[in-house]
Image: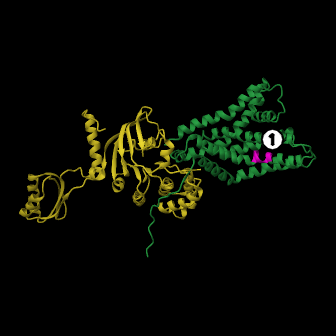
Chain colours: A yellow, B green
Amino acid sequence: MSEKRPAQRLLTITSKDITVRFGKITALDKFTVNVPSGVVGLLGPNGAGKSTFIKALLGLLRPENGKMIVAGYDPLTETSTVRDMIGYMPEHDCLIEEFNAVDLVSYLGQISGMMKRDAIPRSHEVLDFVGIGEERYRTISSYSTGMKQRVKLAQAIVHDPAILFLDEPTNGMDPQGREDMMELIRKISLSDKTILVSSHILDDLERVSDHIVIMNDGRLITEGSIDDLLAKKDGQKMVKVRGIPENMETFIKALAEMYEIRSVVKGRGEISAVVINKGPGNPVFKLSRDKGVQLRGYYPERATLEDVFIGTVEQNLDKEKGGGPDVN
Amino acid sequence: MSIDPITYKPWSGERTNHLERVWVMSMAFFRQKLKSKWILLLLIIGLFLVNIISIFVYILPPHEVLDGEVMADQMGNGLLFIFIILLISMICSDTIAEDLRSNSFVLYFSRAMKTESYLAGKIGGAFLTLSVFSFFPPVVLAIAIMATQSSSSYGDSLVVLGQTVIAGLVITFFFIPAGLFISSMTKRKSYASVGTFMSFFILMIVGGIFSEFNPDWELMDPSLLFYYFLQAIFGLGLPNSVNVGLLTGIFLTVMFVPLILVYIRINQKAVGK
C-alpha cells in the first residue's frame, strides 16, 4: 500500500523558546524564529547553534523546552510526517563509501519512500543535475570532497522534498565548486521550496537567500528579508567625483561641512566618499558644480551581509555588556 | 539549436509505506552480502559439507517417516554450529560498524525511519543472508525426507516439518543480536568480525572449564545452548543435569539483551557529529 504525499501546506518553520543543552553547554538558548518559505540563510559563526537547530527541527534532538512547527507539524510528535517532507544535507562526511553514487542515491530514495522503478531513474536525474557524470559508477570512497558534497545534495533532493535543510553545503569546496553549489541551490529554489541553508560564509548566503536569520551563541541576533537587512544603512550614499585634484579636495572639505562623511577613498583622478544624507541629492549636485568637479556617481550605498553580521553581533554584545534588553 | 541546461525537475510519485522501506534495507543488505566473495565461499563450503552430504545420508537409505531425531541431529551438529558462527562473524561485522565509521546513521534517521525500523532492516538483512545456510536447507531436507518416506502416514512428518521450520527460524536469528551488538561497539568491521567469533569461542571455553565445578556453567557454551534448544523443540527431552529455568533465561538473554543494548547505542549515535 502506498502513502499519499503530505498535502501542500504553507512551508514555514517556526520555533519558540527552544532550548537545547549538551551537558553544561547551551547550544540553543530560548531560540525563537520564524522561517518563511523561500531560500533562508541561517548565518552564524562556528558553534552558533545552526546545526543544532536543524537537528532539532528534524527531531534528532529533543529540546528541553519550547515549541517547533515545521509546515504545520510538530517534529517531536509527528516526526515521520515531518521527515518525509524534508531533505537533509549534513555538514560532515556521512556517505556510505562502499556504494557507488547511483546505488546510494537510489537506495536512499527508496528509504525515503520511492519505489525502485522511480528511484533509479530519479537518482540518475539528480546526479546529472548536481554534475556527477560517469564517476557515478565509482565507489564513493574514491570521490573528492567536492564530489561528495554534490552526492550529499543529490541524496537530499532525490525524493523531491518540500523543505530542504542544507548544512554548510559548500564545506571544503574550492571557489568554483562553491559557485556551482550556490547555482544549484538557486535552481532548486525555483521549484517553490523552503530551503534553509546554514553557513558561516557570508558571500554564499548573500547570493542565494531571500531571507536571513543571524544567530550567535544559540540565540537569534536578527532576522529579516535580505533586502531589508542590506538596506539598513539608512541615508548612506556613495559620492564619486573626478576633476582637478585641488578642486576635488575643496569639494570633499565642503561636503564634510554639509554632511557626515563615513569614509573617503582617493584613487587615480577620482575620489569616492561615503556620506550620510537622508535628504535630497540636489545640494550635492550643486556643490559639485560650484567646486568645478565632475560628479560621476551618487547612489545609495548598499550594505553587505558582512556589514550587517558584524554590526548586529557587535550591537548584541554591547547590549549584553550594558545589561540592555535581549534581542530575542 | 542549443542543448537545454539541466534544471531541477520535481518528482511526483507516491511514497511507499514504512514497512516497505524496512524491506528495502533488508534486501539491500542481503544483496550486498551476497556480493562478498568470502561470504559466498563460506556459504558454498558450508552448504556442501553440512547439507549436501546430509541429503545422501538421510534420503538414500530407506526411511519410514521424517524423524525429529534426524532433524535435531542435522541442525544440532557441531559443523553447522561452527559455520553459523563464522557466517555471523562475517555477515554482522559491518552491519552497524560501517554506519558508525562513516557517520551515516544520519542518512537514515533524517528520513522517516525510527531506530526500531533501522534495526529491523539490518536484522532482516542478516537473517535473509544466514537463512540461505541455516533455514532453507534444513527445511528443504525435511521436505525431501518426507517426499521419499515409505509410510503413507504424513501426520507425524508434518509435525516434524513444523518443528524444523520453527527451529530453523530460531537458530538463524539466535546469534544475530550478539553479532549486531559487537558490531555496534566498534567502527572497524575487522574488530567486529574477530570479536564476534572470539566471544563465542571464549564462552565455549569458559563453559567447558567451569562445568567441571558446576554443571550449570555448561549453559555458557553457545553450542550446548543450541543443542539443548533443538532437543527441546523436537520433543526429545533434556538431560537431567540441565536446569530448564536457567536454560530458558540464558537463551532469552542471548537473544534479546544485545538487541536492547544495540538500540541504546544507536540512539546515542543517531544524532551524528
Q: Secondary structure at mark 1?
A: helix
Q: Which residue is mark 1?
A: B75
Closer-to-camera residue (B200/B21): B21
| Residue with the most extreme top position | B213
Residue A183, horizontal then vertical, whole percent: 40, 60
The percent coordinates of residue B84 (x first, y second) are: 74, 43
Amino acid type of the residue that numbered disc 1 sits on in the rendered structure: Met
Image quadrant containing the N terminus of chain B: bottom left
Front in this rendered view, residue B63 or B189: B63
Question: Residue A227 vs residue A15: left or right?
Answer: left
In the depicted structure, whether residue B227 falls above or below residue A267: above
Q: 10 Å neighbourhood of mark 1: few (<14), some, or many (≥20)?
A: many
For this rendering, which residue is in front, B48 or A195? A195
Q: Does residue A187 appear in the picture of this structure? A: yes
The spot of residue B4 in percent (x, y) is 44, 69
Q: Is residue A232 inside the magenta stretch?
A: no
Q: Is residue B116 left or right of residue A67?
A: right
* Residue B134 colored in magenta in the image: yes
Q: Residue furthest bottom?
A: B1
Towards the viewer: A203 or A122: A122
Tell me residue B147's x, y (percent). 87, 49
Chain that bears disc 1:
B
Magenta span: B133-139
Vertical position of residue A85 compared to residue A125: above or below:
above
Magenta: main secondary structure: helix
Task: Decide if residue A249 is in sight here.
Answer: no
In percent of the image, x 8 and y 52: which residue is there? A257
